[in-house]
Image (spheres, helix red, strand yellow):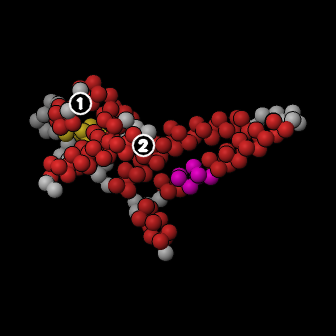
């Protein structure tokens, strides 16, 4: 397989996986392109390489920057904005895990806390609602705590964790 074919296959697959992870295809493809790029890319570079519109590129770059995955960089002598992404896979995983906790897990924990702390009126329906939402709340809190522990570990947390699991 030649470079261009491998590049297109990687970016296409990463884009498809992005959809499974809850982000849109273009957003994942932009991150994949920046991830394998040897230098920062301009919006124009990204648009031309991925054959996507300026609006789509701009919107997705903004979202990637909001996630903390993509950053703007200054290129000496250039007026255009250039973009790059975290290249360390473990650090990238930590950033994504931290952001998913903030955006997804924390709000769910708050809702489950509110729902599970309703007044018990003594009915079976209410008791079951409280019991089940409390169980989900506790599970969510524990999962978030575990995720936060992984996020705050040293840079090689992923590798060390996998090695420990395999032993």
Furthest residue toward left: 77
Q: Residue at x 46, y 42 (%)?
A: 99
Residue position for label 2:
20
Judging depth in this view, the residue of 16 and 102 nearest the camera is: 16
Place of residue 166 in the rendered image (x, y in percent of width and height, measured from the top left): 47, 71
| Magenta stretch contains residue 146 | yes
Q: Residue at x 81, y 36 (%)?
A: 125
- Mark 1 surroundings: few (<14), some (14-19) or many (≥20) residues within 10 A: some
Furthest residue toward bottom: 167
The label on residue 155 is none
Place of residue 28 in the rendered image (x, y in percent of width and height, measured from the top left): 33, 41
Q: Main secondary structure of the magenta part?
A: helix
Residue position for label 1:
52
Let me know if residue 67 appears in the view: no
In what quadrant of the picture does the N terminus appear? bottom left
Residues under numbered marks 2 and 1 in contact, where contact means CB atoms less than 8 Å apart:
no
Q: Quadrant of residue 68?
A: top left
Place of residue 163 in the rendered image (x, y in percent of width and height, measured from the top left): 45, 70
Reply above or below: 153 against 160. Answer: above
């Amino acid at each position: 397989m030649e470079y261009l074919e491998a590049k297109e296959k990687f970016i296409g697959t990463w884009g498809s996986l992005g959809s499974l992870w809850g982000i849109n295809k273009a957003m994942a493809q932009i991150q994949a392109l920046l991830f394998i790029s040897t230098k920062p890319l301009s919006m124009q570079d990204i648009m031309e390489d991925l054959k996507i519109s300026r609006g789509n590129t701009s919107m997705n770059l903004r979202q990637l920057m909001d996630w903390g995955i993509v950053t703007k960089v200054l290129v000496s002598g250039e007026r255009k904005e250039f973009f790059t992404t975290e290249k360390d896979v473990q650090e990238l995983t930590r950033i994504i895990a931290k952001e998913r906790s903030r955006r997804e897990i924390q709000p769910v924990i708050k809702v489950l806390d509110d729902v599970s702390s309703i007044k018990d009126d003594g009915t079976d329906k209410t008791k079951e609602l409280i019991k089940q939402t409390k169980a989900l709340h506790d599970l969510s809190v524990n999962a978030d705590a575990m995720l936060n522990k992984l996020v705050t570990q040293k840079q090689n947390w992923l590798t060390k964790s996998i090695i420990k699991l395999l032993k």
